[in-house]
Amino acid sequence: MKSVENALERFLFASRWLLAPFYVGLVFCLAFLLFKAGQELIHFATIIPTAKESEVILGVLAIIDLTFTGSLIVIVIFSGYENFVSKIDIGEHKDWPEWMGKIDFTGLKLKLLSSIVAISGIQLLKAFMDLKNLTDRELIWYVVIHMVFVISGILLAWTDKLSEQSKRH
C-alpha cells in the first residue's frame, strides 16, 4: 500500500510540469505586448509635432501602462515558475534581479495586486485626461473599479499580515 501511495505522490508532484507551457505562453504574450508597445510608440512619435500637452501625457501613460503590464507578466512567469514548477539555477546569471527566487506565493499575490492597482490607476488617470470624451457614468465606473482593486489590495495585505501574526503566536 505504501508503494501505491509513493507512486501517486510522485505522479502528483510531477504534474506540476503541466504548468510550464502556461509560462511559455506568457512569454509569447510578452512578445505580443512588445509588438503592441512598438505600434504605440510609432503612433506616438507621429503625433508629437502637432500634439497638445494632454495628448502627449496620454501617449506617455499608454506606454507606461504597457510597460507595467509587461513587468506584471515577467513577475508571474518567474515567480510562478519558481513557486510551482522548479527552482531556476541563477549561478550563471550575473545580472539576476535580487527579488527573483525570494518571492513566495503571498509575495506574488501582493506584487500582482499592486501591479493591477498601478495599471488601474494609470487607466483612471488616462480617463481623467480625456474627460471631454467620457460620460459621467463611464467615469464613475473607472473610479469604482479602481477602488475595488485598491480595497482588495488592502484587504489582501491585511489578511496576509493577520495570517503571519497568527503563525508567530
Image (cartoon, rainbow, N blue to C red):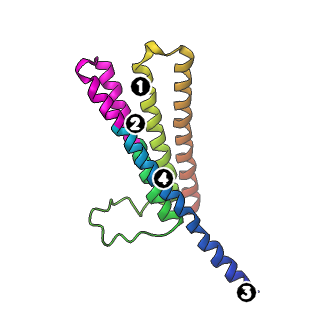
The residue that disc 1 covers is: 126
The first of marks 1 and 2 along the sequence is 2
Q: Residues within 10 Å of mark 3 (few under 14, many from 20)?
A: few
Rendered position, 42 above or below 54: below
Per the image, label 3 sits on a secondary structure element best described as helix
Residue at mark 1 to residue at mark 4: CA–CA distance: 26 Å
The first of marks 3 and 4 along the sequence is 3
Rendered position, 112 above or below 83: above
Mark 4: amino acid:
Leu
Residue 65 numbered tag: 2
The residue that disc 4 covers is: 26
The first of marks 2 and 3 along the sequence is 3
Q: Are marks 3 and 1 in contact (CB under 8 Å)?
A: no
Mark 2 or mark 4, which is nearer to you?
4
The first of marks 3 and 1 along the sequence is 3
Q: Residues within 10 Å of mark 4 (few under 14, many from 20)?
A: some
97 and 24: which one is in front? 24
Q: Which residues are magenta?
A: 39-68
